[in-house]
Image (cartoon, helix red, strand yellow):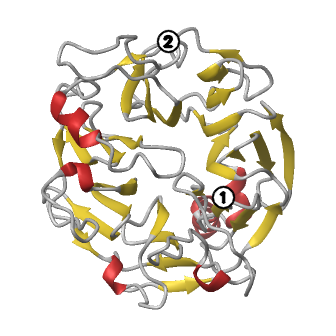
Amino acid sequence: MAQEKRKAAKARTKAPDRADAAATTGQLVVLVATRKGAWLYHGDAQRDTWRVDGPHFLGHIISHLVLDPRDQRTLLAAAKTGHLGPTIFRSTDLGRSWREARQPPAFAPVATDDQGLPGRSVDHSFWLTPGNASEADVWYAGTSPQGLFRSDDGGDSWRPFSSINDDPRYRQWMGSFQDGTPDGPKLHSIIVDPRDAGHLYLAMSGGGVHESVDGGGSFKPLLDQLDVVEGFDRSDPTFHDPHCVRLCPSNPDRLYQQNHCGIYRLDRPSEQWLNIGQNMPKSVGNVGFPMVVHPRDADTAWVFPMDGTAVWPRTSPDGRPAVYATRDAGESWQRLAGGLPSQQAWWTVKRQAMTADPLDPVGLYFGTTSGELWMSRDEGHRWHCIARHLPEIYAVEVARVGDPS
């Protein structure tokens, strides 16, 4: 009898198989923001079938669509509309209904400020980040041109946050170096340390990577060992162009960065970035926009390279798209292209348009500039197309809903 009880206890505590693991973590929804609206793809527990919900905001430019992980119900959409201009829409019922923010992000309406700097207006909100788990209604937004904003009421009203929007040094660093890039300069990659609501990171294109340890009271550059375009001064933040910065969920002291000039890793408390892009195949290069990190393994990350030759085609190298993975923190990289087009596929993936789910094995998702949504159930080894013929995809996020916990 005792042996049977031990067997029963072991059966109850064994690791669940993939289907069981997915079932116990709720369902997934893939959030797709595009140049002409937003779509939600609801997946079953096994990630085999997807139900489409959309379009939402058809014809509007949606830069980012994010679900609040703290309630798994509230959605924020960063939108630019023909008649309303730049705004934020909010849904508290997973997209069944939407309401515009009462006070979207906006700079002060002045011709010049007290420093003599010209006034600015928000062209669009580009990046949305939920606050720390300890701050239930806090959100952050990054805009184009570069501005940092915060909401304390779940995204309904926004105000300028920190001093950087009007700091003369930061205004200089925001500068005009990147004003000619597609869609304009922008503040992005707003990161909140899960252990400390007052520990923040952000990145600016251009303007570099910056850190605050006092809740946004002050920021300082984190640029040591980052390269810049040849001929420019890398000691000047103006000339730094981070494309995407990610913090490792399993080790918040490690950050990865996909940069205009390579791929980098930072292990705190060090302030020196390590160039891990130099280990990419020379024929592919280390230029790209998105960076994705594994939710449970800080040594595993994925990038999507693009052609970074002198004329900047911003397409897959040689028309052969592939994801590259590292499982040793950037010491080596593996090409993952199973199921992807083997030739004549001249698209790329934008900085917000690649992400990972929390399941085991991890699912990866990316959207292309030609309107295709791809996913992998096995951490990138084999890819399947979920949707085709969407508008140009600007951002892809994946969220868990209906978590039994």
From the viewer's side, name the closer residue of 100 and 405. 100
Residue 263 against residue 367 in the figure, above or below: below
User: Which sits earlier in the primary sequence, circle 2 or circle 1?
Assistant: 1
Residue 391 is situated, as x and y percent measured from the top left of the image, at 77, 50
In the image, taking residue 367 as reference, residue 241 lies left or right, namely left
Residue drawn where x is 17% and y is 61% of the image: 234
In the image, taking residue 296 as reference, residue 93 lies left or right, namely right
Which secondary structure, mark 1?
helix
Is residue 320 among the parts visible in the rendering?
no
Residue 255 is situated, as x and y percent measured from the top left of the image, at 31, 58
Is residue 220 among the parts visible in the rendering?
yes
Residue 37 against residue 203 in the figure, above or below: above
Q: Quadrant of residue 310?
A: bottom left
Residue pointed to by mark 1: 21
Residue drawn where x is 28% and y is 47% of the image: 207
- Tally of numbered discs: 2
Residue 296 against residue 381 in the figure, above or below: above
From the viewer's side, name the closer residue of 220 and 359. 220
Q: Quadrant of residue 365?
A: bottom right
- Observer-side mark, 2 or 1, equals 2
Disc number for residue 157: 2
Amino acid identity at mark 2: Ser
Residue 132 is situated, as x and y percent measured from the top left of the image, at 38, 31
Which secondary structure, mark 2?
loop
From the viewer's side, name the closer residue of 235 and 365. 235
How crowded pointer 1 is (Cα within 10 Å; few <14, some 14-19, many 20+) is rated as: some
Q: CA gap, disc 2 to disc 1?
A: 38 Å
How crowded pointer 2 is (Cα within 10 Å; few <14, some 14-19, many 20+) is rated as: some
In the image, taking residue 61 as reference, residue 354 lies left or right, namely left
Quadrant of the frame with the C terminus: top right
